[in-house]
Structure formats: C-alpha cells, structure tokens
Amino acid sequence: MSAAPEKEKSELLQGTLDLLILNALRRDSMHGFGLSQRLREMSRDVFQVEMGSLYPALCRLEAQGAIKGEWSVSEANRKARYYSLTAAGRKLLQKEADQWEKLSRTINLMLKATA
Amino acid sequence: MRWIRSLLFRLQPLFRRNKIEAGLTDELRSHLEFATEAHVAAGLTPAEARRAAERELGGIEQIKESWRDQRSLPWLDHIQQDVRTALRSLRKTPGFTAVAVLSLGVAIGVNTTSFSLVNGLLLRPLAPLRPDELVTLFVAEENVRFRPSSYEEYLAFRAHRDTFADVAATLRTFTSVAGPNGLQRGVGYFTSENFLSMLGVTPHRGRFFTAEECRPNAGLNVVIASYAFWQRLGGRDDFVGSTVRLNGKPYTVIGIAARSFDGVNTIIATDCWLPLGVFSTFGGSERGQPAANLADSNSQTLLLTARLASPLTIETARARLPALAQQLPTAARPRTLKITELSRINGGSRPSTGTDPSAFIAGAFLAVAAGVLLIAGFNLGNMLLARGADRAKEIALRTALGATRGRIVRQLLTEGFLLALAGGVLGFLLTLYANRLLYNAAAQINASYYSLALNLSPDFRVFAAVAFFCLFSMLVFSFLPALNASRVDLVQDLKRQGGETTSTHRLGRFFAWRHVVLMLQIGLSFTVIFCSALFIRGALLAGKAPPGFDPSSGLVAEVDFSLQDTPFADSQRAIAAAIETARAQPGVIAAAATTLLPYGNMGAAKDLEPADATARAAVSADKIRSHFAAVTPGYFDALGVRLMRGRDFTPAETSDPSSAYVAIIDERLAQRMFPNGDAMGQRLREPGHAQYSSTPAADASPEFEIVGICAPHRHETHGEAQTCLYVPFAANLEHRHGVYIQIRTSSHDPALVGATVASVRSALFASNHELPLVQVATFAALIEKEGTLWLARFGAVLLGTFGAIALLIAVTGIYGVKAYAVARRTREIGIRMALGAPPRAAFTLIFRQALLQTALALAVGSLLALAAGRLLNSFVYKISGTDPLAFTAAALLLAIAALAACWIPAQRAARINPIIALRSE
C-alpha cells in the first residue's frame, strides 16, 4: 500500500483509512470519486488519498461486509458504483471511532507528559 | 464464521477473477470520467482535464495489482503463476528438460529400487500386530550351546504371563505337493495354535488351529495354506475343506491366511502351517530319524516366538530372563535365555551374530545409488547454473520491472521442484519395473526349494523415500543456482551482451563454481564406476574357474525321498530303476546318481584324516575338510570326469549298505592326504568319529579304503577348489535329501540337450509315477543358479548399471559445461585469434583446462574410491577391494570418456571464426 510520497501531505496512518471511509459514508452513499473528493474536503486538503489505496480499501471493507457497493446512475446520468454503510459497518465505525478516540487521547497525554 | 466468509471471498478471485477485474476496471473508468468532469468544471480543457485525472488516479493496472495482492491469497496466486511460468520456460528448452528429467528419473529410480530392497529385507514389519513387541526366544546350555526347546519348556515359558503375553512354538519343515512337472517343494511350519493369532494374522478364509489340533500326537490332519500357496494350487473357491497331499499324506485345508502374510522370514515364504499335533506323523524323514515325540522332554525341536507382556521392552524383559531360566522344569544343565527382535532371515536355533550379509549388501547398493543421485544432482545443478547465467538478463529485466528477489528465487525453485517432481514420477515408474526384474531374478535361484517371500512392492516408506530423494536432489541441484541468483547485479546484467562474466583470472576460472561442481561429479563418478568395475571383474572371474568337466551335454534329474515315507531299501531300488530308465532314453550315453550336485547350492562335508599314524604325521593340516558324496557306479563317466587310477565302485558295493567301506577320492585330496606316498589302498577316516556320528548303525570309526582316484574337478564357484571323497551310494545312510541323477547325452548343443529334458521327465514318470521327482533340468541351467555365481553376476549387473548411469551422466555433464564455457569465451577466443593465435591454441586452451580438471578430480576421487573399495572388500568376488586392474580400468574409462566429451567443444573453439565472433556482439 503506497501512501502519498509528497512532502507536504501527511501520510495516512495505516488502518485509519478504513475509519475515514466508514465515517464519510455515514450519511450518504457515495461513489469512489465522490468519496475521494469528500475525504480531501474533510481533511481541508491535508490528506491526499491515493487511488491505489482507496479502491483496494473499498474492496476490503466490502469483503468484510461493512459496506455494500451497487451500480446505479448518477444525477449527471453517469453509471457509477455507489457504496453505502451496512448495519455491520455502523457497528464497526462506532468501534473504530471509539478506539481511535482512546488512542489519540492517550498519545496526546503522553506527548504532553514528556514535553 | 467471519473468517470463513473472508476466506471464501479471498478464494473466489481464483475462480472468477476475470469477472471481478472487469468490474474493477469499469469502476475505475467511471472514476476517471467523474474526475475529468470535475477538472473541466474547474476550467481545464477536456484533454488537459483527462490527463490530470489520469495522473491523479495513477495506473489502472497498478491499482488492480494492489487489489490482487489484497483481495486474493497472494501466495496461492503466485504459486499458480510460478508453476505456469516454469512450465512455459521448461517447454521452451525441451532438450534441457528431457535430459534433466531423464537423468534425475534414472538416478531416483536406482535409489528407490535399492531402498525397496532395504525395505523388503530390513524395514517392513514382520507381523501385522504391534511387531515391536515380538521377540525370538533362544535357549542355550552353558551359555554357549544354543539349542531348540522341548515342548515342556515351551509350556513353561507360556505360563510366564508377566514376562510374555504369549509364546508360540514353531518348527520348519520341507513340504511337497504334486505339481505338473513333478513334486513342488516348499516350506511349511509346524506351529502351536496361537502362532498366527499372536502375530495378529487373520484368516482370509476358514479358521486357524484349535488347541486340540496342536496337542502333541493329536494326529488330526489339518493344514492352513498361505494365500500364495492357495493361488499356486489353482485358487479354487472350494479349497477350504478340500484335501491336499503333503509329503504323500492327505491333509484337510481348514483355512487360508491373510494375503499380506507369508511367514516371518523376509526371504523364504511359508507355504503352509501344520498343527504341532501332526509333527510325529508328518510324511518325510527330513527331520532325521526316528520321528521325534514332542511329549518327550528330551526331544528338543521347537523354536520359540513370543510377544512381550505389555509394558516391557526387549531391554527390560532381558533383565527378567535369568530368573525365568531358574524356574524352567527338569533342568539337567543350567540354561541361559536370550531374546532378540523377531528374526527376519535367521530360521535357526542360534541367534545371528553381527550384521546379516544380505542387509550389508543392500545397504552398500543404497550407498552407491546415493552416489549416483549426488552425481545426477550435481549435473543438474551445473545445467541450471549455466541456464541461470544465460537467463541473467531475463532475470535482471524482471527485477527491473519490480519482481522482488524472493520472487525470482521462488521462480527458480519452482522450476527445480517441477523437474524433481517429474524425475520422481519417472523414477518411481522405473522402480516398479526394476523391482519386478529384481524379484524374478532372485526368485528363480532357489525356486526348486522354496518360493521367495521378498516383498518389494511400494509401501508408505517407499513413497516417503521417493519424496526424500526428490527433495534431496532438488536441494543439491538448486543450491548453487539459487546462490547465484541472489547476487543479481541489475546494471551489470542488463548491460551484458552474450556474457563474459567469468573471472578473467586463470585460477578463478579454473575453480569457477561450475568447474568445482564438475570435478566433484567426476570424482564421485569415478568412485561409482570403480565399485562397479570391482563387481564386474568379480563376475567375470566367477565364471572362469574351469570345472574340470564339460557340463554342456549334461542333464540332471533330482529326486527327493525325504519328502516321502519310503523305506530306505525301496528308495534305493527306485533310484536304481530311475537310472536304468534314464540310460535307456535315446541320446543318453551315461547316467548315475549322486548325493552331491556340483555347483548345486546344497553341500555335505566331512573332516578327514589318514587312518595310518605315519601317514597322518606327514599331513600338514591336522584335518582336511572335504566334500562327501555317495555315488552309483558310472558316476564319473556320467559327469565326464576321468577315473585316473584304480577302479569304479561295483554294483555289489552300491546296493549293499553293509559292504566294505571303500572310497574314490579326487587327485587333489590324494596329494594333500598322502604327499609322500601312494594313496591307492590307503585308508581315510573321520577324526574322532564317534563324536560326530549320528548313525548308530555304522561302526565306531569307519575307515574308507581308497580304491580309485579321479581327476580333480570343482563343486563350487567360490574360493579354492575343494577336495571330494566319494563312497558307494548305499553306504551313505545319513544323507537322504535330494538325490541327483547325472545324465550325459551325446549332444553338446544346448537346444538338443534342452529338448531331452521333457522326454527324460516323462519317461521317469511313466516308469514310476510315485517317484518323488523334484526337477529335471539341463546341467548348465542348474550351474547358472549356483548361489555365489548368481550373486556375483547379480551384483555385477546391478552395479554395472549404476556405473553406466554414472558414466553417462558425467559425460553429458562434462560436455554441457565445456560447451557452455566455449560459448561464453567465444569473444575472448575470437580476439586471441585476431591477434594471431593459431586455432590449435584455442583448442589447447579449452582442452588443457579440461585435462587438468579431470586429473585433479580423479586424484581426489581415487581417495574416495579406495575407501569405498575397502568397505566392499569382503563382498566382491575373488579380488581385493583395491584391485589395481579395476582401478586403472575405471580411471582410464572415465578419463577417456571425459576427454572425449571435451573434444567436441574444444574443436568448436578451434573453429571459431574471429570475424564472426567479434561481430556477433
């Protein structure tokens, strides 16, 4: 999984991509391109998600049953594969978000403690 | 359950990969369109927008690749790919593949065949049920004199349930049934009722013995047949319940043993089992006279097999034996007990000492075969090395395109694995064929006595061995190429043009990997060829010793009265009548009977000394062991040996057992017994005769008066010619085994002599249909079956095959490496020639290197060869294990073959055209 090599852009932490995808799909179903745009917007252009990571990640999540992909037609009358969160995906999102929360809080604490 | 779904999901691309990939491609395409649209909206031209979108996306193929890695099981996928690529690349070089698979297959075949032999002789379990618990129980008096046990002792052992879970008594006997060409001899065992069930054998049909049938002197005539025996007798469905005549008496078949079991001896098959209850009434006098009574505690005849009580091992059980010996009944003399693992070959009452020679021979074959496998492995390693060097560019290219080093090595290993696999399959098929040849060759040698039990059919151990040989050879041959492949120099290899990567330093080139391997190969080949040369020389010598007579016109008819209950006088008359019948046949010149067949596998010998004290003093050895045969008048004529002095036996001496002891000796014995005087009229006797005698009828120390001296002749292939003492036929009361009627015909033509066999057989049967005729065969055919000769020839054929294979593989290896070296140095040689070197110099360049390498390899190999020869010392026939002739012959053969193999590449080097060589870059 090759993360973005550009200097300015932070590398995505391994495993956080899944969480971000699940989060982005929380309300609406989206196709791959839309998802990539959304992720960039949400990070205020800090994260550039590599397509080479995004699509395999989508496949992986689909394999786990967290999301579901369906071909349908966009507003602009274009065929695209739309991904939506399943019930299992919601649970997974909740779990991962909690874990992340705990992890980041802990790391912040430790960083302050050493500082 | 989630992992199952995940696994299924991961597996599905293997089967529906194209469909899924097509879906992914569609999705990525739609992504591109969205992205292009977005860029256009941001103000780019459609073309620019498209390019920007593509740039952002990265390659569709790369995304698919990372999808593949994630979504499928990559290793399974890779294996599939590797196998496909390897098959493709092997198919592209059919010559290489064929040579590799063939040489590997032959080497693995040779090894598996040798292993099958070791397996059949040493490894196969002897009994179906927990064979580790089974032991053979030996009884010795005064610690040294081993003897069979009495029935009483057997019962005592059987009562010791805390040491032996069970004890069974057996006794071997010769049996015979009527066959199409006379009596068929076989081997049977008297057993106690528990023998077969103790071993875990089950009946194929019918039942096994009851305790009542096995009670001493029960006299219930029943028999259990082995599966093979049943098949030989026709395999009828109503066999159980029918009657067979064994040694002339009727026995009811009550059962057939399971197919897989034909006795505990790995060489001699058991045809049938008889209850101990018929021991004293069983036909034939083979066991000696008078028939022993089992109930008598002085009758010590039984051999014991036992199953140890549950927690005991052989070692722990041994500790209990001394106490057990104390508790045995009627101990006239102190007894010692000994247990060993169940005897595989030894069927006697004395435990074997040391390694069994057949096991050693089988092991030696396996060792030599392993040498052949090593040679083949080295050879293939070299071929792969050369191939790898040729493929360096391809490999560098693949590395540049992103293949990891591990992936490349895996690819090479896959090729090696496929070669090994194909070689293993071929080797296994060859083994099946070779095993059949081996079995048939070994089965005919003593076919008139017993059928061969040796089981060479593949079992799981043989399969495991094949797998091991494949793996072993793969390790040997892929080690170097893998080593090489792991130091790929990308830039160098990509730049390379038809390659001169060999070290330019002369010594470095001389000891380049492939040359070291080549020298190893030559050295090992030398060892193998030397071993086979030893055996071949032995076999050639084996046939050389002149027998002292011409067997080509001879026929032999064997009758065996020990298989019948015929009174002695009647058997004498029957033999005399049979001789007359044979003599009357057209084409027959002479016929006479003997108890000792020259070059037969059975012998009888006696120690002899002059009866006269002064003559005795002149003999250097205190006693001389000599063949002992009883013959009818005219024997020497029938055999074709000249009676040099004196007279033949008279008919009166032959027919009358009480007649004076007279003897005819051969000239060699005459010289050894009476070096200073005339042997005629002297007397010979057995030293301390009374001690050895088992014939109470004979007087205390019979002295044989010498009435004739015959020309020296041989009775055996092996060793120095033995001396022989002949007595009149009737005088030999002890020997009642096979009697051989020597028949001489007027022809020397093998076909004509062979044709007489059938007519003599039918005439003998016609004149006396009760005659226990075992076989009629040409004398020459019987001599071929002489044990030592057969073994010498067998070893020569087997090791000769090994040697030939080693030579062939070595030659192809040398040729391959040298041809390759010339190809790689084409440019260098071209430059040398352009600078004025004559073609001869190019030839010398290549040839001198080969010469030196061969010489060095032979020097190192000779050390190994001599070491191997020393090990084989006692098993090669007649010559020492370091025989200089075999050594020189092997060295010369290999050197000539090696240099011949280099000749062609060296010639090619000499013919290099410098202009073409330099332009070809």
Image: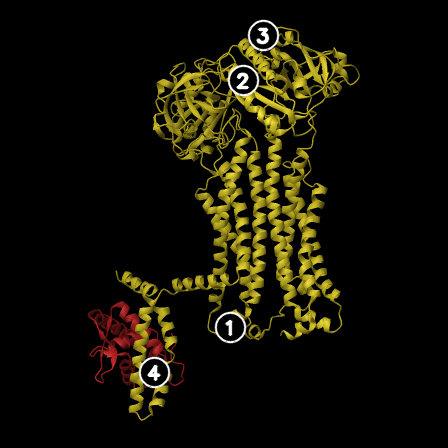
Chain colours: A red, B yellow
Vertical relation: B675 (above or below) B164 = above
Disc 4 from disc 1: Cα separation:
32 Å
Mark 2, secondary structure of its residue: helix
Write down the residue under mark 1.
Answer: B397
Mark 3 belongs to which amino acid? Answer: Ala
Q: Nearer the viewer, residue B691 or B449?
A: B449
Mark 1, secondary structure of its residue: helix
Disc 2 from disc 4: Cα separation:
107 Å
Badge 3 and badge 4 in a common chain: no
Neighbours of disc 4 within 10 Å: few (<14), some (14-19), many (20+): many
Query: Where residue B12 appears, x then y in whole percent?
Result: 31, 64
Disc 3 from disc 1: Cα separation:
96 Å
Vertical relation: B633 (above or below) B143 = above
Disc 3 from disc 4: Cα separation:
116 Å
Of marks 3 and 1, the one in the foreground = 1
Write down the residue under mark 4.
Answer: A48
Query: Where residue B411 appears, x then y in whole percent?
Result: 48, 63
The reply to whether residue A106 is visible in this rendering is no
Badge 4 and badge 1 in a common chain: no
Write down the residue under mark 3.
Answer: B697
Mark 1 belongs to which amino acid? Answer: Leu
Q: Nearer the viewer, residue A37 or B713?
A: B713
Vertical relation: A101 (above or below) B810 = below
Mark 4, secondary structure of its residue: loop
Mark linked to residue B764: 2
Badge 1 and badge 2 in a common chain: yes
